Image (cartoon, helix red, strand yellow):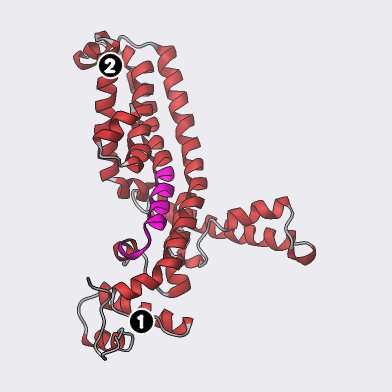
Amino acid sequence: MTEIAKSVLGGSWTLVLGWILPSSLGWSLFGFLVIPSLTNLDIFASVSSSSASNQALVLLAASVILGLTLASVATPLYRVLEGYVLWPPRRAASMTEKHVLARRAAKEEVTKARGAQGRLDLRGALALERFRRYPDDEDQIAPTRLGNAIRRFEYYSYDRYQLSSQLLWNQLRATASESVVKDVDDARAGVDFFVCLLYVSGAASVSALLALLSPERQAASLILAFIIGAAVAVACYRLAVVATDAWSSAVRALVDTGRLPLAKGLGLRMPETLAQEREMWQHVGWFLGYSFNAGAVGNLDAYRAVDETGEHDGGDEE
């Protein structure tokens, strides 16, 4: 089924893996355990009575449609899990404070676990793993574990280089090597998979609970669907947090190795010192992130690349 979807989508394997495949798993759970209790509805009755091949086609079509739909609203889906959307302000604030304390506790545990020559025992290594899933700056702490795990690499480029990777994300991808960009896409697909499966399994669990009101309900199957869906949703959240480790490494590699081609693509030359580079990227952020300002232009002129003829070189041209 996934091979068919892959060919239909023109080889966009990350979309298939991240959104289509988990959608098919959610539909399968719904189809096997919930639909038998909804045969009083014509649409589900016709699916239940159709041949196995027709049911497979329906599953494929429904998976592709649902997967594409969820992929198109990926940002708000992530925002909810990160604690930025649909969270009461007081709840978000209390959860943020909880994670600030958890980060400090992990840091203290790492410090205490350091033995001779700064080596960590197993307990300290696990504490370091937890600590590294938080942003470097406590002011960037988010209300949820997933929010912090993602925020750590969103903030990385600005913390190290004063380069806003979110503002310059498309430019970074356009100038970075294809292998690094592919690593980022592949790593994100792993997180997308668990996020999508969380939502679809959660939806299947809720639908099973509602189906208990149906006159043709099969209580045992519906209770089983509810338990499986809820358990899968909880597990997927935890796995999504862990999967951000690969995503974080890939994004950091993109930033670290993509800064030079990005500067060249923007017609800028890299300064001699890191302090000067941080200042340059800060000026780039001001220039691109706000309305046009002549002062911002003047600040960037000092970093404009100049070719051998003395003219400003905006990059290689064919």
User: Which residue type does callout 2 highlight?
Assistant: Gln
The quadrant holding residue 169 is: bottom left
Mark 1 lies on a secondary structure that is loop
Residue at the limit of the structure toward the bottom, as seen here: 310
* Front-lying residue, 134 or 121: 121
The quadrant holding residue 24 is: top left
Q: Distance between the Cα atoms at labels 1 and 2?
A: 59 Å
To which residue does mark 1 refer? 269
Q: Residues within 10 Å of mark 2 (few under 14, many from 20)?
A: some
Mark 2 lies on a secondary structure that is helix
Question: Mark 2 or mark 1, which is nearer the start of the sequence?
Answer: 2
Q: Is residue 224 magenta?
A: no
For image coordinates 30% across by 35% down, the residue present is 6
For image coordinates 37% across by 36% down, the residue present is 199
- Which label lies toward us, 1 or 2? 1
Q: Is residue 173 depicted above or below 7 in this figure?
A: below
- Horizontally, residue 262 falls left or right of residue 101, namely left
**Which secondary structure class fits the magenta region best?**
helix
Question: CB of mark 1 within 8 Å of CB of mark 2?
Answer: no
Q: Residues within 10 Å of mark 1 (few under 14, many from 20)?
A: many
**Residue 306 showing in the rendered view:** yes
- Horizontally, residue 278 falls left or right of residue 41, namely right
To which residue does mark 2 refer? 55
The quadrant holding residue 39 is: top left
Q: How many marks?
A: 2
For image coordinates 51% across by 42% down, the residue present is 238
Q: Which residues are magenta?
A: 174-191
Task: Estimate the x, y position of residue 62 in percent, counting from the top left.
Answer: 26, 27
